[in-house]
Image (cartoon, helix red, strand yellow):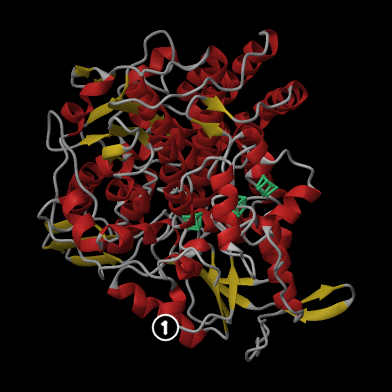
Amino acid sequence: MRLSCDIEVKPLTRVEGYGNISIRIRDGRVEEAKWEVVETPRFFEAMLAGRRCGDAPLLCGRICGICSVSHTLASIRAVENACGLVPSRQTSDLRLLLNHFETLQSHILHLYFLAAPDFLGQGSVFPLVKTHPDEVQRALRLKMLANDGCDIIGGRSVHPVRAVVGGFTVLPEKKQLSALRQRLETAAADLDATVELFAGFSVPDFTRETEFVSLKGEGEYPFIGGRLVSSDGVVKEEHEYLDMTNEYTVPHSTSKWTRLSRQSFAVGALARVNNNFAFLHPRARDAASFLGLAPVCHNPFMNNAAQVVECVHVVMDAVAIIDRLLAADPDDAAVRFEPREGVGVAALEAPRGVLYHAYEIDGSGRIRRADCVIPTGQNHANIYHDLAAFAESCAAKGMEDREIEHLAQVLVRAYDPCISCSVH
Amino acid sequence: MNESGRNIRPGGERNYLGVAVPRPRVAFLELTSCEGCQLQILNREAGLFDFLDLVEIADFREVMTERSEDYEIAFVEGCISRDDEVERLRSARERASQLVAFGSCACFGGVNQLVNRIGGHGRAGKVVYGDFPVDARGVSEPVSSFVQVDLFIYGCPVRKEEVEKIVTDLVLGRPVVYPSYPLCMECKAEENICLFDLGEPCLGPVTMAGCGAWCPGNRVGCWGCRGPARDANMEQLFAVMERHGFPADMVMERLECFGGFNRYLDRGSTGTG
Ligand code: SF4
Ligand code: SF4
Ligand code: SF4
C-alpha cells in the first residue's frame, strides 16, 4: 500500500523557541511539508533607534539568552566599526576567547541535552541521568567549563557584563586564565569521548545540495569579522552583508527569510566546517574524519557532527589564546570611546551561524537605524526545503509515519534552531 | 509573601534534614522572552541535578519532549505580547497552585516593554516588517496584568543562587523574603569601588538588592533590572546623577529599560512613589 499520513508536531520540543512541523503525504506523494515559525516578535531593531550607541550591546544581548555573548560582541563591533575604533590585540583575543566559551556551552547544551536523547531513545536528558550517567556527567563537566570561562572573561554566563565598546571593564586575573587553561587541557578526554559517542549514532542517509554561507577563513578558522563566503562561490566584504542575506517575509513565519544563489542557504557549524575545513585545528580535523565528516557535506543531519568538531577546535584554540595572553604584557582593559557619526556593520559567527548587526549612528552618538540578521532566520528557508525533500525521500522509501515524524524532528533539531532569537 | 493557598500535592517524596518533604510537580512556561532565565536553571551544573531533585519536572518544553499538564508550580518566563500567550498563561494559572513570575520580562515586561514607549507593536512593526502584518496585541505587558501572581523572582537574568533558595523555601513551606533595601547596601558590603567615583552612572541607590551587586562588582553601573527597592527615593537619585553630570534623559533611559520603574515614570514626574 502506498503511504498516506498527516504529521503535526506543534510545537517542536527541545529547541529554543516556538516552531511547528506539518507534513501531509497522500498515496506516496508529499502534498505539504511545512516549517512554521510562530514565536512572538519583540521589535529590537525599532527599540534600538534613538538609543545611545554605547548602550546597544547591553540591550542586544537580550535578543537571546543562549547566544547573548555573540549578540553583545556583534553589537560592540558594529558600534566600533561605525566610530572607527580599533580594539587592542588583547581585547580581540579576550573577545574571541569569550566567543569560544559560548560556542562550547551552546554546542554542548544542544548536543547532549537536546539532540542526544533522540539517539538514545529518550524524550529528554532527565532519564539519561539514570541510563547514561557517564555521558550526563561528562556533558555537565564540559558545560560547566564553558560557563566558568564565560564568567571569568565576561563577568557572567548569560548576558555578559564586562564586554563593552572599547574593551572590557575588568580583566581576568592571570591565575584564573592559567586555571582555565589547565581545565581545557583535561577536557580533551571528555571531548574524545564525545566524538566517540556521536560517531556511534546512526545518521540518516539523506542529502540535498545546499549553498553554505559563513565568514571566510583567511589564515585561521574565522569567528569575529572579516569577509563572507558561500560554497557557491560568492565572496563579499563584511559591510556588504545585505547582498549576502536578501531578507524577505513569508506568511507562515514571524521570522524573515533569506536567500542567495538558490532558493535557500544554510549557516551554522556545518556551513563553517564545509567552508573553512582547512583552518580547523588538526585535532578537530581528526575528529571530523572519525565522525565521517568531509567537506563539502550536504547532509543536514551532520550539523551535529560539525558541532562536535567545533567543540574540539574551540577548546584547542582557547588554549592557544590563553598562552598568548599569558605571554604578553598586560594592556589597558579598554580604550576610550568617542561616539561619532557613521555606519558600522559587524559579522560574527554565533554558535548557530553568521550573525549581523548594522547600525547607523547620528552626530549625537545615538542610533538612527539598526538592522540585525540572525543565524536561525537565515536557516528557516533551508529547513523548510530540507523538510520537503526529506518527506519525499521518506515517502519514496515507504517509511512508517511514526518514523517520518521522529526523523523530521531530528532533522529540524539538527539545525539547533534558536527561534526566539530569529524573531527578535 | 507567599501565603496564598499553598496546597502543593506531593509528586513523590524526598528527604530534607531527615524530614520527608513533598516534591512538587513544576512546569516551565515561556512567553515573549530570550529564554535566558530558563537557561540559568540549567547553569550552575555542579548542583543541577540536586536542585532538580527537589522538584519533579512536569513540563519544560525547551529540554524535554514528554509534557504533562499536571503540575503545582508554574514558572512563567517572559511577558505577554500576543493573544495566544494570554490563553497559555490563563491555563497555567488554572492548573498551578503557585504561579511564579520568573525573571524581569515576566515581572515587569522586561526589555520587551520598551516597545510600548515607541508607539507599541503597530509602529514598531512598521519599522521592522514594513507593511507585512504582525500578529501582536499592541503592547508588551507583565503577566500580573492578566493573572494573579504568587511569587516574583526578579532579574535579567535571574540569579540561580536566588532561584535555588526561593524554590527550596517554597518546597519546604518557608516564607520567601526579599531584601527591601537598595542595592548600594549590598554593593558596599561587597566593598566594590563605587561607579560614581569611576565617573559612571548607576541605579544602585534606588534598585532592589538581592543580585549581590552583580554589575557594580564587574565595574558596570546598575540598570535597575530587578526593579525598585522599597521606598526608592527617586528625587535623590536624580539629584545624585545631576551632581555627577549625568543628564536626566540618561537616567530615564536606564529607569525605563526593564520596566520595573514604570510606576514612577508613567506618573510623568521624578517624585517619590
Ligand atoms: S528577564 Fe532577561 S534574561 Fe530573563 S527572559 Fe527576560 S530578557 Fe531574558
Ligand atoms: S556602585 Fe552603584 S550600587 Fe554600588 S555603591 Fe555606587 S551607586 Fe551604589
Ligand atoms: S546590578 Fe542592577 S542591573 Fe545588574 S543585575 Fe543587579 S539589579 Fe540588575
Q: Going 31% across and 53% down the picture, which residue do you hit?
A: A408
Q: Chain of mark 1?
A: B
* CA neighbours of label 1 inside 10 A, class few (<14), some (14 to 19), many (20+): few
Indicate yes or no: mark 1 CB to ligand 1 under 8 Å. no
| Residue at numbered disc 1 | B91
Q: In the rendered image, which quarter contains the C terminus of chain B?
A: bottom right
Residue B226 seen from this side: no
Residue B52, image quadrant: bottom right
Residue B205, image quadrant: bottom right
Q: How many marks?
A: 1
Relative side of B74 to B185, left or right: left
Note whether A197 is above or below A182 in the view shown. below
Which amino acid type corresponds to the residue marked 1 in the rendered image?
Ser
Relative side of B131 to A5, left or right: left
Note whether A11 is above or below A69 in the view shown. below
Q: Position of residue A169 (x, y in %)?
A: 60, 31
